[in-house]
Image (tube, rainbow, N blue to C red):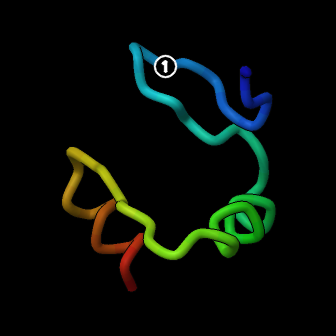
Amino acid sequence: MKDNNFIDVLGYKVYKNTLIDALKYIDKFNKVHIISGNPEVLYTGLY
């Protein structure tokens, strides 16, 4: 089943809606892994 909240970018699933929608989407999970090759993006995501 395909999740319409994501687009494929070079094989990675990237959330395509707003930041508020993303926070609501991940709020239902027990654990979330933030994956980024850019340390600045990773730091901002954790801050």
Q: Which one is in front, 40 or 22? A: 22
User: Which residue is pictured at 63% across the width and 65% down the height?
Assistant: 26
Instruction: Name the amino acid type tagged 1.
Output: Val
| Residue 45 pos. (x, y %) | 42, 70
Residue most extreme to the top: 10
Quadrant where the N terminus is found in the figure: top right
- For the image, the number of numbered tags is 1
User: Which residue is pictured at 42% across the width and 26% down the height?
Assistant: 12
| Residue 14 pos. (x, y %) | 55, 35
Q: Which one is in front, 29 or 4? A: 29
38 relative position to 23: left or right: left
Query: What residue would you read off at disc 1?
Result: 9
21 relative position to 34: left or right: right
Crowding at dot 1, Cα within 10 Å, few <14 / some 14-19 / many 20+, comes out as few
Above or below residue 10? Residue 35 is below
User: Which residue is pictured at 72% across the width and 21% down the height?
Assistant: 2
On the image, which quarter does residue 20 sit in? bottom right
Above or below residue 40? Residue 10 is above
Considering the numbered disc 1 on the image, is that residue within a helix, a strand or a loop?
strand
On the image, which quarter does residue 10 sit in? top left
28 relative position to 31: left or right: right
Quadrant where the C terminus is found in the figure: bottom left
User: Which residue is pictured at 75% across the width and 37% down the height?
Assistant: 5
| Residue 36 pos. (x, y %) | 28, 49
On the image, which quarter does residue 16 sit in? top right
